[in-house]
Amino acid sequence: MTPIITAFEHSPDRGKGLARDMRVRWALEEVGQPYDVRLLSFQAMKEPDHLARNPFGQIPTYEEGELVLFESGAIVFHLAERHAGLLPRPAHARARAIAWLFAALNTVEPPIMELSLARILERDAPWYEQRLPVVVARVQKRLDELCASLGDADWLDGAFSVADLMMVSVLLRLKPSGMLESYPSLAAYVARGEARPAYQRAFAAQWAVFQAGANAG
Ligand code: GTB
């Protein structure tokens, strides 16, 4: 049975691959699982049909027969558990990979999202210039810590795993800000993730959606 994921019909990132369906596409490509995509408008995401898949009316979701999942982390974890290749077998290494998966989502992604939202939504606020350095400093703290932990290793804990897939996905959101350039080892880590054939296939698939929308006018 071919699983179905949901994604933006017209992604606001204009094909940059920054929306959260990208991490799910990447995981599906890493494990070699073909998938279908249901594209949704912003309006369709808030209609009962989609709210039954995700109570928050967001993408991505994942349908596999009777199983319906939301939250990109839960979907990627489900794929990593079901298929070989994204989680190490030894129990301790597996538990550590899961800890890093949570760290990407709970410790590193929130300040990055806050920065991203501040830049998009708060730019015209009178306090924007005062607040921005505080938000930037929170991101820098996490990047300093991550940099120290990664050291000169290729991946977070041994071989590439679901932890790296999620951490790279989270860090990619910083690319437009140029902040990663001050962290050469993290920039190289992200580039290693982007160079993976599975990432390339996932990126091409979401880019094709953007192109089709652009060509349709
Ligand atoms: N915690 C959830 C998860 O991980 O699945 C968060 C899901 C989420 O935020 N989904 C967003 C969404 O559906 C799309 S990815 N938003 C519509 C809504 O809430 O009504 C977030 C996103 C949006 C746009 C860009 N961009 O333009 O660069 C990047 C990321």
Image: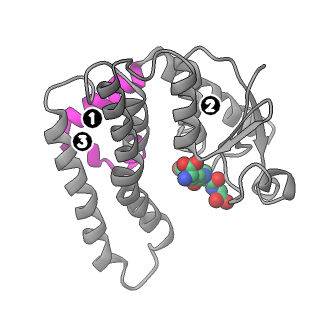
Image quarter of residue 63 = top right
Q: Is residue 200 magenta?
A: no
* Marks 3 and 1, the one that precedes in the sequence: 3
The residue stretch that appears in magenta? 172-195
Q: Which residue is mark 3?
A: 181
Q: Which residue is mark 1?
A: 187
Q: Residue at x 13, y 41 (%)?
A: 148
What's the amino acid at mark 1?
Ala
Question: Where, quadrant-wise, is the N terminus in this rendering?
Answer: top right
Q: Assign a secondary structure to mark 2.
A: helix
Point out the residue furthest to the bottom here: 126
Question: Where, quadrant-wise, is the C terminus in this rendering?
Answer: top right
x then y, percent, for residue 151: 14, 32
Q: Is residue 177 magenta?
A: yes
* Marks 3 and 2, the one that precedes in the sequence: 3
Q: State whether residue 178 appears in this view.
A: yes
* Real-space Cα separation, disc 3 to disc 2, in angstroms: 24 Å
- Mark 3 vs 1: CB contact within 8 A: yes
Above or below for 48 versus 61: below
What's the amino acid at mark 2?
Trp
Q: Assign a secondary structure to mark 1.
A: helix
Image quarter of residue 163 = top left
What's the amino acid at mark 3?
Glu
x then y, percent, for residue 112: 37, 55
Given this view, does label 3 or label 1 mark the residue nearer the observer?
1
Q: Assign a secondary structure to mark 3.
A: helix
Image quarter of residue 150 = top left
Residue 63 located left or right of residue 187: right
- Is the CB of the residue bearing disc 3 within 8 angstroms of ligand 1? no
Q: Which residue is mark 2?
A: 207
x then y, percent, for residue 5: 71, 35
